[in-house]
Image (cartoon, rainbow, N blue to C red):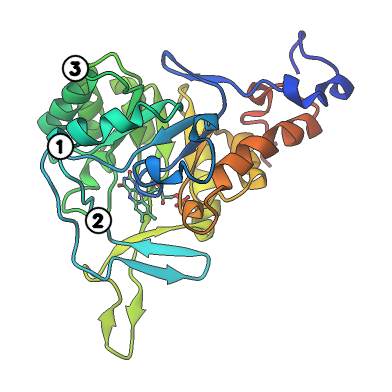
Amino acid sequence: MTASSPPPSEAHDLQAIDMSLKIGDLALANPVGTASGTYGKGLEFQPFYEVGRLGFVVVKTITSEVRPGNPPPRLCEIPGGLVNSIGLPNPGVDAYIETVLPKLRTLGAPVVINIAGHDIDDFAFLAARFAAEDGVDALELNMSCPNVSGGLDFSTDPKVAKDVLVRVRAETDLPLIAKLSPNVTDIRPIGEAAAAGGADAISAINTLVGMPVDWRKQKPVLGRGYGGVSGPCIKPVALRMVRMLFETVDIPIIGIGGIENADDAMEYFVAGAAAIQVGTANYYRPTAALDIVEGLPERIASLGASSLREIIGSIRMP
Ligand SMILES: Cc1cc2nc3c(=O)[nH]c(=O)nc-3n(C[C@H](O)[C@H](O)[C@H](O)COP(=O)(O)O)c2cc1C
């Protein structure tokens, strides 16, 4: 509790719970966003609820060229989650800016454009392209896609991670979010490198590399063999990585992995996340992100706090 916070009894005025935060210069009304690749273009969810009530929307990864994606099957259900090998299908940056971006400007929530370059210059090119457009509130750099050749390289080597950020930072003043891979021995040096390179926040985590197997066919289930594991089954792994990053860097951490309700989100906040993204849950509970926005104030108040800020990282580690 800060000196200016109301005592716990008054904090139960749920309207008064302050859930705002900043990512670089971007002010967000609340910490709940959607995870790239699991929320379509953002537009698909408009029939279900007012998307503008979310803290932010992260769109599917955009690349400089059109990409058809990976061979099917691309998706496999497992207990507690999914394994996907989608492969970043998208129309390419030019078509995207012409056809999709104008519609995103109507969402009402801050729009985070997720980009993936095939090399560092390509990251810089994409950043510059989007920075020149209206309606882009921040960039998330997908440095961690396990489903494209070389996709993991940008967040498995600290030097490369820093180089990507430095190069992109030179192109734009937009808030930059570095999305990291969990497929490393130690995520901390990568987080440090991204922060040193100019990242305003870190998203953790992308999917864990896995391989569902059909033993009868003696083949992997997915067309590409390997895929990315997501959903509730990865949550403890992600929580640990968020905590490790929280103890290492001074920039906000955006927690991602298996979040389907407000209690899951609270686990991330006390572990050290300043914001969260909802991914796989969007497929089976389309209102999950909004439900979390609505469920957070009473949970924050139940800890005797009057703002989200007070509880971030408040877990007592042994
Ligand atoms: C079907 C699917 C597609 C995804 N596509 C992307 C993508 O295009 N870009 C990206 O950065 N992450 C992508 N992700 C990763 C998610 O954004 C998220 O980091 C991961 O799924 C963990 O969160 P979750 O357990 O809540 O799903 C994808 C995940 C899934 C399940």
- Label 3, label 1: how far apart the Cα atoms are: 21 Å
The answer to whether mark 2 and mark 1 are in CB contact below 8 A is no
Give x and y (percent) for residue 227.
Answer: 30, 62
Counting from the top left corner in percent of width and height, residue 201 is at 41, 26
Give the position of the N terminus as an image quadrant: top right
Label 1: state its secondary structure: helix
Query: What residue do we see at 22% from left, 39% from top?
Result: 62
The residue under the point 27% across, 48% down is 145
Depth-wise, is mark 2 or mark 1 nearer the camera? 1
In the rendered view, tell whether residue 58 sits above or below residue 27.
below
Q: Residues within 10 Å of mark 2 (few under 14, many from 20)?
A: many
- Label disc, if present, on residue 95 of the rendered structure: 1
Mark 3 or mark 1: which comes first in sequence? 1
Residue assigned mark 2: 147
Looking at the rendered structure, the kind of residue marked 2 is Asn
Lateral position of residue 93 relative to residue 190, left or right: left
The amino acid marked with disc number 3 is Glu
Q: Which mark is residue 184?
A: none
Q: Which mark is residue 171?
A: 3
Q: Is residue 65 above or below residue 13?
A: below
* Element at label 3: loop
**Separation of residues labelled 2 and 3 (CA atoms):** 27 Å
Ligand 1 neighbours mark 2 (CB distance < 8 Å): yes
Is 124 situated left or right of 234 in this image? left
Foreground pick, 55 / 205: 55
Judged left or right of residue 53, residue 179 is left
Secondary structure of residue under mark 2: loop
